[in-house]
Image (cartoon, grey):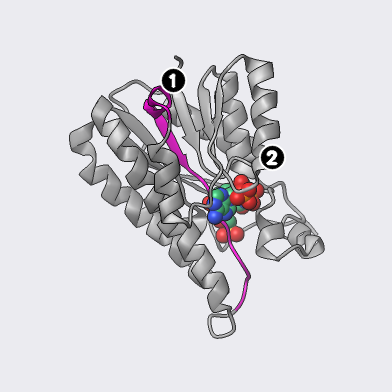
Amino acid sequence: MSKIVFITGASSGFGKAIAEKFAEGGYDLILNGRREDRLQELGNELENRFNIAVYLLPFDVQQQEKVYASIHHLPAAWQQIDILVNNAGLALGRDYFDEASIEDWNVMIDTNVKGLLYVSKAVIPFMQKNKKGHIINIGSTAGKEVYEKGNIYCASKHAVDAISKAMRIDLLKDNIKVTVIHPGAAETEFSIIRFKGDEETAKKVYDGYQPLSAADIAQVAFFCTTLPEHVCINDLVITCTSQANSFYTFKKG
Ligand code: NDP
Ligand code: 8X3
C-alpha cells in the first residue's frame, strides 16, 4: 500500500485541495467531512484520475463517540496512517463579544478545538505503534492575533496553536512530527459559512486584493510532509502578499 493521509473537512476548501494535492503525489486518502455526497464525488474523481485508493470516513468531528467508533473500525491496512491533517473547522458570526451567539461559540469550540482533540486522540495510537507519523493542524492568523469581533473564533485558533505546541512536546518520544499551518485570508466557503449564507457579505471580505487560494495551502501542506525524516516545520504563518497579519491588508480602491 502507498502512504496514507487522513484529512478532516475534505468536502470543501483547504481539505479538498489538500486531498487533490496528495492524490497527485500518489498517496492513498482517508476523507472526512459531514457531506458524504461531496466526499463520494471527490473520492471517485481522485481514484480515477490518480489511480489511488480512497476510504470515506464521514462523521461530525464534534461527536466524540462517532469519531472514535469510525476511526477504531478502520480496516487494519487503513490504520497505517502516515499523515493526519486536522483541517475541519469554521467561524460562525462576526459580532461583538457581548452580542455574539452562545450557540455559535459552542459550535466553534466543539469543532475547532474538541473535534481536533477527538480525531487526534483516536489516530495517535496507530502512529505510536509505527513509531512515526506527521500531524498537520490548520490554525489561522486568528490564532496569532485577536481582532475585533473575532473573539471566540480567535480563541479557538489560539487553542489550536497551544495544542500543537503541546502535542509536539509530548509526542517527541514517539517520533511524531507536529506542524501547525496558520493561513491568513483565503477564498473558500469559509466566509459564506461565517456569514450564514450571505454570499454578498462573504464576497466583500476578498474585495480589492488577491487572497490565498485553497491550492496555495495544499502546496504548503504537501511541502511540509515531504522534507527529510529528521526535519520538521513546527509553525508556519502564510498570508497572501497583500496581507501582513490579522490587522493589516492592503486593499485597492
Ligand atoms: P470551508 O468552509 O471551505 O471548509 C471547511 C471544511 O470543514 C468542510 O469540508 C466542512 O465539511 C468541514 N467541517 C466543518 N465542520 C465540520 C464538522 N463538525 N465535522 C467534520 N467536518 C467539518 O473552509 P476552509 O477550507 O477555508 O477552512 C478549513 C480550515 O481552515 C478551518 O479550520 C478554518 O478555520 C481554517 N482557516 C481558513 C481560512 C480562510 O480564510 N479560509 C484562514 C485560516 C484558517 P462539511 O460541512 O461537509 O462537514
Ligand atoms: C480565517 C482568517 O482573518 O477570517 O481564519 O480570521 S480570518
Q: Nearest the camera: 84 or 136?
A: 84
Ligand 1 under 8 Å from disc 2 Cβ: yes
What residue is disc 1 on? 3
Which circle, 2 or 1, is nearer the viewer?
2
Residue 228 belongs to magenta span: no
Q: Secondary structure at mark 1?
A: loop
Image quarter of the C terminus: bottom right
Residue at 68% of width from left, 59% of height from top? 193
Q: Secondary structure at mark 2?
A: helix
From this viewpoint, is residue 200 visible?
yes
Q: Position of residue 238 (x, y in %)?
A: 52, 44
Most common SS among magenta residues: loop
**Which span of residues is magenta-colored?**
75-95
Above or below for 48 versus 169:
above
Q: As shown in the figure, which amino acid type bears the numbered disc 1?
A: Lys
What residue is disc 2 on? 38
Residue 125 relative to residue 70: left or right = left
